[in-house]
Image: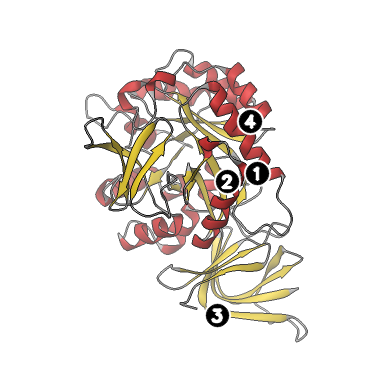
Amino acid sequence: MYAVQVGKIVLPGRVETHGYLLIDKGEFIGFTHEKPSEDINVVDRSTYWVAPGYVDTHIHGFVGHDVMDANAKGLDEASRALVKFGTTTWVPTTLTQTVEQIGRACESVYEARSNRSDDFVGARIEGIFLEGPFFTEKHKGAQNPAHMIDPNIEILEGWQKRAHGLICRTGLAPERSGAARYCAQARDLGVVCALGHSDATSAEGFACIEAGATTFIHVYNGMSGLHHRNPGLVACAMASSNTYGELICDGMHIVPDALTAFVKAKGWEHTPLVTDCLRCGGMPEGNYMLGDFPIRMQDDLARLVMPDGSLGSIAGSVLTLNQAVKNVVDWNIVTAEQAIRMATEVAAQASGIDDVCGQILPGRHADFNILDNNLNVVETYLSGACVQTSSQL
């Protein structure tokens, strides 16, 4: 057993100051204000924040690897790199390709997760997010419309079988035929339904919510916008109760004023931070592939490459959650505590994986970050072991 002496610590329901986080055999034991006995080693971080490890629930890849490569070793490499940025849990995210390609990707995620040894140093895989193929073309983004189909519960069940139950969230456009019924069926299977890449009316969105949908995919991006006589899916995301709307906070997908408007309408408690990061995250600028499409990453943003070589619409980000947390605080949208929760417990709750990650709770893996007062990640711990240290410490 050892203890971490904290300056501030983000615990369920509150921030505590000047105490000790107890850790034993790789698990959290609890928090106390009492100084541990002399025989317990104390790691002094009394001028720092202690926060749960970040949880990225919408991320396609990192450091040259993509979930759709269906390569378990590539997923391991991405996991090793992500933990260096404070992400201790991630949900590998597919995109719109053929049913078989998505199935192979699901198998590879399960293979990567199940074959890890106890001493593997990398972000944990705690689910799969299926971003597609049940979308519509008008707001396709970088999703291939050639593979878009109507929601089908039998197809989801087939993917879930190949994933050995790892699928935690499935995306769809509310205007697709059978969308509301699919939401109800997926809910009964324990899979969260997420609405996006859609030109749906607000009424069509609410029909899916009434059937069981609870989240919205990267709000504003890839969905019908807010208009006072045609509210669209953005209004549905803002106005619906007990739903979550994920945001990409790189400052380019959405400008800060729009982020502020959504957080004020929705509440930070229902606004998970995500990255939507692609394989080019953590890589040099240049040309890459996203599914069937060529993309170019430059100036910290990935865009589709058009047939004439020009750059088209945004394809995704190269954001990491540690930067997203800093951004929303630097832009005065939320407090430091709220930002940390948006990237940990809120993200986990929105994807239905809050039973295993997102909070510092006794008995859970001791996965946590040490942050300075500017919210830079200076250390990351997995199962109580320090796996990343910044030169700032």
How crowded is the residue under tag 1: few (<14 C-alpha within 10 Å), some, or many (20+)?
some
The kind of secondary structure element at disc 4 is: loop
The image shows residue 78 at horizontal and vertical percentages of 54, 51
Instruction: Residue under label 4, please give it.
Output: 190
Residue 200 in view in this figure: no
Mark 2–mark 4 Cα distance, whole angstroms, equals 25 Å
Q: Residue at x 25, y 49 (%)?
A: 257
Instruction: Residue under label 1, please give it.
Output: 112
Q: Residue at x 51, y 38 (%)?
A: 93
Instruction: Residue under label 3, please give it.
Output: 46
For discs 4 and 1, the disc positioned in front in the rendered view: 1
Type of amino acid at the residue the image marks with label 3: Ser
Mark 4–mark 3 Cα distance, whole angstroms, equals 41 Å
Q: Which of marks 2 and 3 is nearer the N terminus?
A: 3
Question: For residue 32, what is the image quadrant?
Answer: bottom right
Q: Are marks 1 and 2 in contact (CB under 8 Å)?
A: yes
> Is residue 174 found left or right of 1 in the rendered image?
left
How crowded is the residue under tag 2: few (<14 C-alpha within 10 Å), some, or many (20+)?
many
Type of amino acid at the residue the image marks with label 1: Ala
Does residue 80 lie above or below 218 as drawn? below
Type of amino acid at the residue the image marks with label 4: Gly
Q: Which residue is drawn at 40% across and 55% down?
A: 324
Instruction: Residue under label 2, please give it.
Output: 75
Q: Which of marks 4 and 3 is nearer the N terminus?
A: 3
> Is residue 320 found left or right of 168 in the rendered image?
left
For discs 2 and 3, the disc positioned in front in the rendered view: 2
Mark 1–mark 2 Cα distance, whole angstroms, equals 7 Å
Mark 4–mark 1 Cα distance, whole angstroms, equals 22 Å
Quarter holding the N terminus? bottom right
